[in-house]
């Protein structure tokens, strides 16, 4: 029974005609699938409880998802339940399957409610599916007492009622009260109305900053090349291997290659840096300010 191609009404009629399983038959089918991977047993089990999946899917129509998609997700949850069901626990399959069907439908609804992820934690899920109902009840009860609940007080009551943090309530309130808005929507109805994306501030580097940075980098490169030119070949090799490689060489490895002690390589490195400092200082006082 392909869930993605069967029309809603045909699928519902098919599910209503499916056999009703007694406890013994259900248990036998569950064992046959778990122990022998008998696909016919799985098919009978799924078909028998597809009406349960469809019934649960219909309760989530108010969230705007197509009924066919909800039924498909409910069917996937039902199949996950069948795959994980342990008949040795003494629980009816329908009781176990309800949780998997509900979880599958709720995950689908939350994924498709908004392009922005609505929530993933258990408290956020609980808020998403219960916040409006609890809020309406609290407001009715307050009105019956002749009271008007403020926004902060209402959020606190919802937090206590559902058992979730207050900041989650405030966050979910903002997400449920808004809707997706395209940045390519125009600001006004006239022909020259700008799109909203046109008024977003560009936080990338401005042209003047880019040009200035390129100039400074080129100047720094010239200074360093000039300073390196004051070194002899061995000193340049040590500086290059110690400071200009993505993975710097150790003093010990350089000493082994050059036939010198580790301490001697350190001394040559220090002398090379001193020469470079003198060369850079001779360029301008601005060099040290630039290098910071």
Image: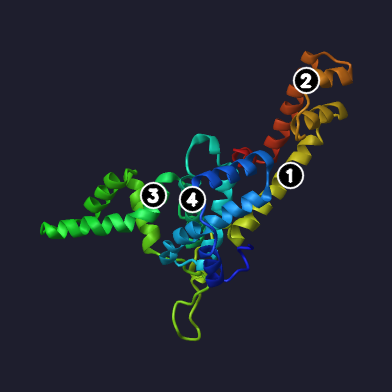
- Label 4, on which residue? 103
Q: Residue at x 48, y 81 (%)?
A: 193
The percent coordinates of residue 261 (x first, y second) are 82, 13
Q: Nearer the observer, disc 3 or disc 1?
A: 3
Circle 1 SS class: helix
Q: Position of residue 190 (x, y in %)?
A: 46, 86
Q: Give left or right: position of 32 versus 21.
A: right
Res. 221 mark: 1
Mark 3 and mark 1: Cα distance apart in space: 59 Å
Image side of residue 170 versus residue 125, left or right: left
Secondary structure at badge 2 equals helix
Label 1, residues with CA under 10 Å away: few <14, some 14-19, many ≥20: few
Q: CA distance from mark 3 to mark 4?
A: 11 Å
Q: Which mark is residue 143?
A: none
Closer to us: mark 3 or mark 2?
Answer: 3
Q: Earlier in the sequence, mark 3 or mark 2?
A: 3
Q: Badge 3 is on which residue?
A: 126
Residue 285, image x and y in percent? 62, 39
How many neighbours does mark 4 have within 10 angstroms: few (below 14), some (14-19), or many (20 or more)? some
| Numbered disc in front, either 1 or 4 | 4
Quarter of the image where one finds residue 286 = top right
């Amino acid at each position: 029974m392909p869930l993605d191609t069967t029309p809603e009404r045909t699928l519902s009629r098919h599910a209503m005609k499916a056999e009703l399983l007694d406890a013994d038959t259900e248990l036998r089918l569950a064992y046959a699938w778990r122990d022998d991977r008998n696909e016919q047993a799985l098919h009978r089990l799924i078909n028998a409880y597809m009406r349960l999946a469809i019934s649960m899917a219909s309760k989530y129509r108010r969230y705007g998802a197509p009924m066919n998609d909800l039924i498909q997700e409910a069917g996937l949850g039902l199949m996950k339940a069948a795959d994980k069901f342990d008949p040795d626990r003494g629980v009816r399959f329908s009781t176990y399957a309800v949780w998997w069907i509900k979880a599958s439908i709720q995950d689908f609804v939350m994924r498709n409610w908004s392009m922005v992820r609505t929530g993933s934690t258990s408290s956020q899920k609980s808020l998403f599916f219960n916040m409006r109902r609890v809020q309406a009840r609290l407001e009715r009860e307050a009105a019956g007492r002749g009271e008007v609940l403020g926004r902060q007080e209402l959020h606190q009551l919802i937090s206590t009622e559902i058992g979730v943090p207050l900041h989650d309530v405030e966050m979910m309130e903002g997400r449920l009260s808004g809707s997706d808005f395209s940045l390519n929507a125009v600001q006004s109805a006239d022909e020259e109305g700008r799109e909203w994306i046109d008024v977003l501030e560009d936080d990338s580097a401005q042209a003047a900053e880019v040009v200035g940075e390129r100039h400074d980098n080129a100047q720094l490169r010239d200074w360093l090349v000039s300073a390196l030119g004051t070194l002899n070949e061995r000193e340049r090799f040590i500086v290059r291997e110690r400071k200009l490689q993505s993975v710097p060489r150790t003093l010990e490895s350089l000493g082994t290659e050059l036939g010198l002690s580790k301490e001697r390589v350190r001394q040559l490195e220090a002398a090379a840096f001193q020469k470079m400092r003198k060369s850079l200082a001779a360029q301008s006082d601005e060099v040290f300010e630039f290098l910071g």
